[in-house]
Every structure is written in structure tokens, then in C-alpha cells.
């Protein structure tokens, strides 16, 4: 299979994770910053409801992560090692699902499988298994055979926009 590239959605999550980190006073990016960016950008199919139940609980969790006052944007931020390891595994996860592009769900599944990742710790604390993540991503149309997953993903988007 040819190299799998990051989707527009994944690129947006990566870019937004930097803003999330800076807003929380962090001078680094972790798997939790990517999770929070995904929850902000794509609440319908993110893990927001799986992990937090609602937007208010997500906001409370986000504030618990605050390291200090917001930092000014100044160049790139380093990734924590756990985030680097998760990003390295992401394309492998996408290939496993025969995806044409890397989606945020592929990153989140990869990060959940990095034992020392902050996301894996959060999942364990909330008793959320990788199986639960996969079921959520399948239910929201993000995982599956390439054609079906792509169609389902975009159909879910359209349904969300129409309902909104």
C-alpha cells in the first residue's frame, strides 16, 4: 500500500492542538492536547461524550490541565515523547483499517495503545477500553473498509450539519 497521508481533519487537529497547549499555558504538546483539539473541532464524532459525557465536563477537565496563564504563540512546540510514539504508530493503525488517509480516530487509537501516554492513562482512569473506542469510531462511521468508512464518515458529517 502506498504511503498514507494525513487527512485535512488530522492536519487541523494537529494545528489546533498547539493552540490548545498554548491556551493552557503549556510549552509542549501531548496526546491530551490532540484529544482536546479533536473534541473542539469535531464534537459529533470525537471522544467527548465517551470520556466526558458532555461539553461542561469537557470544559472542567480542560481547566484541570491548565499549567498557567496562556502563552503567546512563538514558533513550534515540542511534542512529548508519548505523543511522538503515538504519531509514529498512527499510520500503522490507518493501514490496518485500509484507510486512504489518516484520520484523528487513527491517532487516538494509536495513542491509546502507547502504555505511557497521557491519553492511555485517562482512558484507564475512566475505565474506557480500546474496544469501546473502536465501537464508538465504527458507530460514527470512522472505521471500516476504505469505501464504506469514507462514505459513512462524510454521511455522518452531513447528517450532523443538517441536524444542527
Image: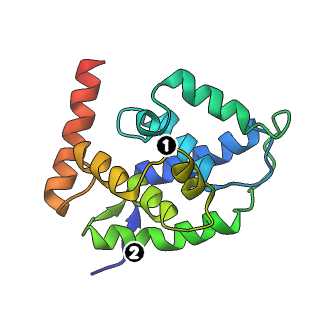
Above or below, comparing residue 158 to residue 131 in the picture: above
Looking at the image, which is closer to me, 148 or 118?
Answer: 118
Quarter of the C terminus within the rendering: top left
Mark 2, residue position: 92
Q: Residue at 78% across / 43% down in the picture?
A: 73
Mark 1, residue position: 38
> Callout 1: helix, strand or loop?
helix
Q: Residue at 48% across / 66% down in the picture?
A: 113
> Callout 2: helix, strand or loop?
helix
Q: Residue at 55% across / 21% down in the picture?
A: 56
Above or below, comparing residue 92 to residue 125 in the picture: below
Residue at the top extreme? 164
Quadrant of the rendered image containing residue 76: bottom right
- Residue 7 appears in view: no
Q: Quick one: label 2, few (<14), some, or many (20+) residues within 10 Å?
A: some
Mark before the other along the chain sequence, 1 or 2: 1
- Residue 125 appears in view: yes
Point out residue 38 in the picture as x, y percentages from the top left corner: 49, 43
Point out residue 9 in the picture as x, y percentages from the top left corner: 42, 48
Looking at the image, which is closer to me, 71 or 36?
Answer: 36
Quarter of the N terminus within the rendering: bottom left
Point out residue 96 in the picture as x, y percentages from the top left corner: 29, 73
Q: Residue at 56% across / 26% down in the picture?
A: 57
Amino acid at each position: 500500500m502506498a504511503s498514507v497521508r494525513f487527512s485535512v481533519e488530522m492536519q487541523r487537529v494537529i494545528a489546533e492542538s498547539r493552540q490548545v497547549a498554548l491556551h493552557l499555558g503549556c510549552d509542549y504538546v501531548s496526546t491530551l492536547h490532540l484529544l482536546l483539539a479533536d473534541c473542539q473541532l469535531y464534537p459529533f464524532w470525537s471522544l467527548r461524550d465517551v470520556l466526558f459525557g458532555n461539553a461542561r465536563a469537557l470544559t472542567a477537565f480542560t481547566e484541570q490541565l491548565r499549567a498557567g496563564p496562556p502563552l503567546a504563540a512563538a514558533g513550534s512546540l515540542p511534542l512529548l515523547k508519548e505523543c511522538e510514539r503515538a504519531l509514529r504508530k498512527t499510520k500503522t493503525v490507518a493501514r490496518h483499517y485500509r484507510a486512504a488517509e489518516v484520520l484523528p480516530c487513527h491517532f487516538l487509537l494509536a495513542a491509546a495503545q502507547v502504555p505511557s501516554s497521557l491519553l492511555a492513562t485517562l482512558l484507564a482512569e475512566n475505565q474506557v477500553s480500546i474496544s469501546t473506542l473502536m465501537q464508538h469510531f465504527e458507530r460514527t462511521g470512522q472505521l471500516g473498509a476504505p469505501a464504506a468508512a469514507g462514505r459513512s464518515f462524510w454521511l455522518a458529517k452531513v447528517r450532523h450539519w443538517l441536524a444542527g
